[in-house]
Image (cartoon, helix red, strand yellow):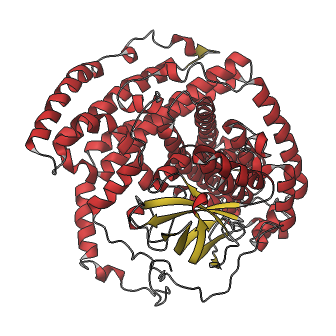
């Protein structure tokens, strides 16, 4: 007889932080361009010359892209997927036959063995045909069963599950619960040891692919007991196991074709052999998986940017107002320039981060997070600008446009589809905090005990001495650097365009960023973690500096190859000039903002001081609870799980 499920944990803010901290990768065994950037060190040598894939990787990747393009052009009806809110089963079966389920899986397990670079190119291509298909493939491979097993699975687990994932079985990743989002310390799903099994109970929400999945990666809490360390643990679970019910297929404002649901586990027996990694390692496995898994979202944003640019160009040439094409009106032209330059930069960030992931020479946990953050925000802005350029037609659906005889441009759909990227796999706000924690890691390593209220005076004294040694060496290096020398980075001047001033700008402002971070830590000390507005701006500055670096390095790579080098330099130049304006604004807002006033207003709102402002409207939300009941127990709903064979 198994033990009863765990009660939903109640945790303090400090305990929640400790759980998140324990799940972090603690060591930096390899260099990181972005980490150095936040420390005020512009290590251009880590990304320039731009790393490139091997000839064999290119051959295999391009061959698959050609097959995938033909499939997308002949077998995918995006309008039907949007209309019916479902990917047809025959399309999914076609993707399986094409090998698309196994793009990242080693050939010895039946996969294609594509590099991260070409995997992302494939996601961008298929996502442009149907974002829902891009999500299906990404959720299956980027965070589903294949990636955790590739990194943490035993040989037996890989042999058992990876061939299935490469050819027939769709997988999903289950972490979120109805009352648990980005705070995993409150995770309530339990996995109680019982002989050679674990007994799984709980409810998981927003299970992308969960409605059609054959295999699941499930995060559940193992209670500590004799012989069991306990903690949040990862399991591979067969979806046809007794006790699993997909209780709902969720519907969203965008990505209407995705198979996202609510999954209930009641007394589900999972063999101990299906546990991935040791007990308590579940969150670390999830976070490590996401280091590269997050790069699938920038891929979708790059695809959207390319499409937005194409539509903006074609429409702005055809549409005339006041005697000339709207592209030649400055208000519209500025939007087109933004879309073109930003698309170039996003592709530069994606390809650079992906190639670094393939080479495994650098630690890219910050680069991958910055890529996700920057691309999701900029992708949304590009789609919004396209809707504005299209005017009323941008707000009109593609189906309606076609019905009255015009080109069926789904601009409003792209806007809806991209919106989730600012929430998926770490919301913008959570990404700010995650990256900020990594950015200040060096400071906390040497001076963390100084601001930890639980540390003894002896610990604080020791930390003070260590911090003194570190800062005595580090701070003087933030005073001057190559960014102040007019001759620095001269190799980035070609075709009448000079990118060297932008790289000097990055170097100078990396040092300024580090000085600002140090000043803030000195000023706020233990309260630094509550200054989320400040930390968010610090991270956004770092993202802009990273994107500028990637854009310049990519432009030089294309020039050296004779691939549109002049135009690449022009786009990099424009992007950097636009980015520098944003950086200046962010630096100004570090110290001149409304953060304190905002907190006062929030306290007033939550205390009911402004309820009078809410009068005069009708609330149609109904009387149901804000968060659905997720009490463990048998399901009382129909199972809507539908595997695709």
| Position of the C terminus by quadrant | bottom right
Image coordinates for residue 419, horizontal then vertical, percent? 58, 60
| Residue found at the very far left of the displayed protein | 457
Q: Residue at x 45, y 77 (%)?
A: 5
Image coordinates for residue 330, horizontal then vertical, percent? 59, 42
Image coordinates for residue 620, horizontal then vertical, percent? 50, 87
- Residue 367 falls left or right of residue 522: right
Question: In the displayed structure, would residue 37 be above or below residue 418?
Answer: above
Note whether residue 304 is visible: no
Badge count: 0
Question: In the displayed structure, would residue 341 be above or below residue 271?
Answer: above
The quadrant holding residue 626 is: bottom left
Note whether residue 272 is visible: yes
Q: Nearer the viewer, residue 581 or 41?
A: 41
The quadrant holding residue 392 is: bottom right
Q: Residue at x 87, y 57 (%)?
A: 94
- Residue 308 falls left or right of residue 474: right
- Residue 85 falls left or right of residue 434: right
Question: In the displayed structure, would residue 380 be above or below residue 250?
Answer: above
Image coordinates for residue 20, horizontal then vertical, percent? 38, 54
Q: Nearer the viewer, residue 293 or 636?
A: 636
Q: Nearer the viewer, residue 69 or 16?
A: 16
Q: Residue at x 40, y 36 (%)?
A: 27
Q: Residue at x 44, y 56 (%)?
A: 280
């Amino acid at each position: 007889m198994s033990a009863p499920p765990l009660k939903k944990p109640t945790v303090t803010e400090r305990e929640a932080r400790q759980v998140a901290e324990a799940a972090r990768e603690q060591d930096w065994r390899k260099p990181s361009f972005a980490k150095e950037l936040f420390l005020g060190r512009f290590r251009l040598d880590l990304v320039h010359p731009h790393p490139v894939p091997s000839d064999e990787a290119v051959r295999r990747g391009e061959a698959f892209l050609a097959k995938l393009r033909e499939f997308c052009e002949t077998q995918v009806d995006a309008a039907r997927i949007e209309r019916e809110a479902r990917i047809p089963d025959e399309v999914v079966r076609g993707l399986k036959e094409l090998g698309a389920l196994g793009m990242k899986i080693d050939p010895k397990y039946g996969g294609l063995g594509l590099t991260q670079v070409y995997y992302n190119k494939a996601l961008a291509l298929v996502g442009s045909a149907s974002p829902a298909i891009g999500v299906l493939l990404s959720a299956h491979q980027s965070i589903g069963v294949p990636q955790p097993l590739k990194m943490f699975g035993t040989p037996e687990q890989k042999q058992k599950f990876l061939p299935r994932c490469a050819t027939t079985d769709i997988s999903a990743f289950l972490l979120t619960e109805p009352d648990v989002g980005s705070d995993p310390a409150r995770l309530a799903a339990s996995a109680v040891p019982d002989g050679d099994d674990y007994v799984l109970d709980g409810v998981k929400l927003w299970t992308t692919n969960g409605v059609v999945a054959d295999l699941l990666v499930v995060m559940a809490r193992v209670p500590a007991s004799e012989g069991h360390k306990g903690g949040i643990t990862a399991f591979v679970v067969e979806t046809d196991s007794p006790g699993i019910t997909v209780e709902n297929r969720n519907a969203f404002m965008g990505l209407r074709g995705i198979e996202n649901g609510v999954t209930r586990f009641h007394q589900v027996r999972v063999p101990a052999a299906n546990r991935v990694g040791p007990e308590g390692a579940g969150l670390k496995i999830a976070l490590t998986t996401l280091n590269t898994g997050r790069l699938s979202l920038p891929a979708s944003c790059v695809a959207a940017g390319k499409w937005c640019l194409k539509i903006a160009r074609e429409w702005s040439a055809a549409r005339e107002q006041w005697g000339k094409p709207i592209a030649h009106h400055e208000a519209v032209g500025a939007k087109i320039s933004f879309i073109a330059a930003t698309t170039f930069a996003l592709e530069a960030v994606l390809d650079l981060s992906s190639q670094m992931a393939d080479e495994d020479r650098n630690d890219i946990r910050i680069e991958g997070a910055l890529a996700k953050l920057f691309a999701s925000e900029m992708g949304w802005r590009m789609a919004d600008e396209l809707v504005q350029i299209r005017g009323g037609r941008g707000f009109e659906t593609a189906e309606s446009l076609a019905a009255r005889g015009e080109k069926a441009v789904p601009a409003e759909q792209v806007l809806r589809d991209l919106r989730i990227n600012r929430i998926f796999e770490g919301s913008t706000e959570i990404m700010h905090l995650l990256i900020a924690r990594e950015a200040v890691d060096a400071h906390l390593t040497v001076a963390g005990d100084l601001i930890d209220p639980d540390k003894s005076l002896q610990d604080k004294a020791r930390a003070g001495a260590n911090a003194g040694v570190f800062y005595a060496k580090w701070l003087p290096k933030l005073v001057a650097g190559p960014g102040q020398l007019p001759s620095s980075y001269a190799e980035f001047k070609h075709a009448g365009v000079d990118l060297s001033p932008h790289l000097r700008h990055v170097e100078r402002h990396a040092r300024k960023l580090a000085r600002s971070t140090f000043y803030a830590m000195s000023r706020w000390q233990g309260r630094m973690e509550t200054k989320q507005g400040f930390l968010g701006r610090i991270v956004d500055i770092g993202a802009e500096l990273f994107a500028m670096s990637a854009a310049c390095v990519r432009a030089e790579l294309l020039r050296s190859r004779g691939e549109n080098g002049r135009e690449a330099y022009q786009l990099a130049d424009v992007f950097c000039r636009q980015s520098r304006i944003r950086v200046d604004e962010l630096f100004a807002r570090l110290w001149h903002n409304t953060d304190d006033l905002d907190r006062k207003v929030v306290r007033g709102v939550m205390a009911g001081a402004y309820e009078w402002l809410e009068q005069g409207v009708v609330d149609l939300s109904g009387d149901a609870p804000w968060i659905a009941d997720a009490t463990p127990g048998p399901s009382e709903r129909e199972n809507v799980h539908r595997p695709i064979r």
